[in-house]
Amino acid sequence: MNNKDIQDEMERQRRILHQLADEYGFLDQRVLVQSQKLDEWLNEYERYKNA
């Protein structure tokens, strides 16, 4: 996976997060789980940058 792929996936995960938050509110379990998924991609991006 290259930098562009990681950034594209981060953006996709961010859009999902915002959609869920708009629909269910920020404290809904689905939103929290999605936030964790986005965090994983942000960590992946940091690892890629620092490699």
Image: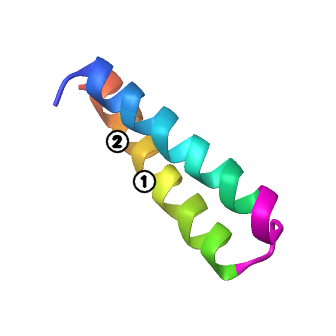
Which mark, by number, is residue 20? none
Which mark, by number, is residue 40? 1
The residue located at (80%, 74%) in the rendering is 27
Q: Which corner quadrant holds the C terminus?
A: top left
Residue 39: x %, y % from top left: 52, 52
Mark 1 and 2 residues: CB-CB less than 8 Å, in contact?
A: yes
**Front in this rendered view, residue 12 or 32:** 12
Residue 17 falls within the magenta-colored stretch = no
Which mark, by number, is residue 44? 2
Q: Would residue 23 appear left or right of 37 to someone viewing this image?
A: right
- Within 10 Å of disc 1 (Cα), the crowding (few <14, some 14-19, many 20+) is few
Q: Would residue 42 appear left or right of 19 to someone viewing this image?
A: left
Secondary structure state at the residue bearing disc 1: helix
Q: Residue pushed farthest left?
A: 1
Count of marks placed on residues:
2
The residue range painted magenta reads 22-28
Q: Residue pushed farthest front?
A: 23
Residue 24 falls within the magenta-colored stretch = yes
The residue located at (20%, 23%) in the rendering is 2
Task: Inspect the image, locate mark 2, and give the three-letter code of the amino acid beneath it.
Answer: Glu
Secondary structure state at the residue bearing disc 2: helix
Residue 32: x %, y % from top left: 65, 70
The residue located at (39%, 28%) in the rendering is 8
**Front in this rendered view, residue 20 or 38:** 20
- Within 10 Å of disc 2 (Cα), the crowding (few <14, some 14-19, many 20+) is some
Residue 20: x %, y % from top left: 68, 61
**Front in this rendered view, residue 30 or 6:** 30
In this rendering, the answer to whether 45 lies above or below 41 is: above
**Front in this rendered view, residue 19 or 36:** 19
